[in-house]
Image: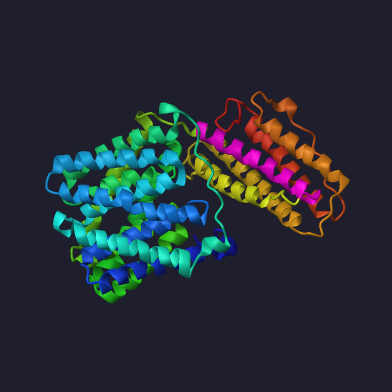
Amino acid sequence: MFVAPDPGRLRMRNSLRAALGIGLAVAVSEVCGLSLTASITGGLAALLTLFTVLDPTVRAQRVTSALLPLAGFPVLALATTLHGTPLARDAAFLAVVFAGVYARRWGPRGHALGIFGFMMFFVTQFLHAVPGQLPELYAAVGLSLLAAGAVRFVFWPIERRTPPPAAPPGLPGTGLARPTTRQAFQATAACAFALGIGQALSDDRWYWAVGTAWWIFVNTASRGETLVRGFRRVVGTVVGIAAGLLIAVPLHGAPAPTAALVAVCVFGIFYTAAPSYSWMMFFVTVMAGLLYGLLGVLHPGLLLLRFEETAIGALGAALAVVFVLPVTTHAANDAWIQRALHCVRASTAAALDRLAGDPDADPAPHAAELELLLARVRMALAPLVHPLSPLRARKARARQVLALLDDCAREVRGLTAVAADPQASHDARLAAACWRVESAVEALTAPRATAERALPVHPRPAGPEPVLAHLHGLEHALAALHTPLRTDPRAPLAVGA
């Protein structure tokens, strides 16, 4: 949370903008005389559009933001209409779960629309909304999306000055071999389990179990990732409940301090989402307690129930990823590590072309993509490097792979910076060094590569030439990767075996 890198203070600025946009959205709803229920719904809609709309271009973000009502309004109508018929409501909720996860196959836009649709159903359960409130719910969501869009695209257009890198495409496959299709069935099974057990525990707050199961599947691609995410969610919730007992309960829903603390929680959610899912869940749990205080229903027993429902949802997710069309951790490891290595090669080639005088060659997009791919590699390897993992040998190898890939990323960033310098010159030795880097990547990713194909590492250059230094740093890191990735082709970290 505190030491994670934040280049250009991008996370800081995005978090401040989110607090401003959500605050403006709620203020607009209040000024228009809408009820507290409608204002909370609008605030959630603003949070979702700022949190989940992650298209690679500003224009695509605007289109996705404009499409959110098309996904959310029908779900709001469905959820409020079925409020008094539990069986039909539950069946509709599970259908929304399946459709929301399945939509991820269409990339960032499908991902955002799926989450928005699910959360519109969820918030009606959270607030016990009824059909008579539907017009003001529509008004609140519409006004809030406009307010959040104005802050994002007009008043503080961060993405216009710093375009976000394109998210790496999901793992390939067709039919049931496609990970998103498998996840749709897994999430639906997990939510069905959570719904049934959660309702047996509480007729009023069962939706927390369903929400937990749903969110555990967001941004995961394998069995191991999902289990680790579930563990971190429970940890964050437990600590958040303890903080809620000390912060939210004594406030008794006092409007001014509650609003200020909610703003702090919003900032914390956005600021910690990337480096720490546990910290993000801490802020989500504290914010939920504060909102319950505003609604006048908060008490210590409710926070205990929140923990119990969270545990049920996490258990449902764990059972689903183990027994329903599982996607193994090894398959995800293999795919993401290979993509990262190929991106290293593409970055190197583009940098050398730029230094050779090609004005169209630009290594910066490849370097940005590499950072995203490394984030996915870290997520894929998280089950192996988790402190509670009993597999010590695999944990050590996974940590070694992560450290060496981080070394590669550092050298690629250095190459990109040098290539951007118009005074940088092209040395005849660079082509040979680039060829060795490409050969090292080929040795790591070829399907039948063995230890005998490891390439000799040339000594580092003695001069001050920065490009050669970065290329030799890459060469050394890639050669070192041969040991953890190729020592045993049958091992879980093996690539291309």
Percent across and percent down for residue 229 are 41, 45
Residue 275 appearing in the image = no
Magenta residue check for 277: no
Q: Which residue lies furthest to the top in this view?
A: 448
**Prevalent SS, magenta region:** helix
Residue 82, placed above or below residue 138: above
Q: Is residue 332 magenta?
A: yes
Q: Which residue is drawn at the image coordinates 50% and 57% (left, top)?
A: 58
Q: What stretch is highlighted in magenta?
A: 331-358
Instruction: Give the residue displayed 23% in from the left and 63% down from the top.
Output: 38
Q: Position of residue 442 (x, y in %)?
A: 70, 32
Say which residue appears at 41% left-offset and 45% top-offset. 111
Q: Position of residue 256 (x, y in %)?
A: 29, 76
| Quarter of the C terminus within the rendering | top right
Question: Residue 139: in sight, yes or no?
Answer: yes
- Image quadrant of residue 241? bottom left
Q: Which of 64 and 182 is in front in this view?
A: 64
Instruction: Please tell me which residue lies in front, 416 or 103.
Output: 103
The number of discs equals: 0
Q: In this view, does 291 lie to the left or right of 164?
A: left
- The residue under the point 51% across, 31% down is 331
* Picture quadrant where residue 34 is located: bottom left
Classify 250 as above or below 426: below
Residue 75 in percent (x, y) is at 26, 48
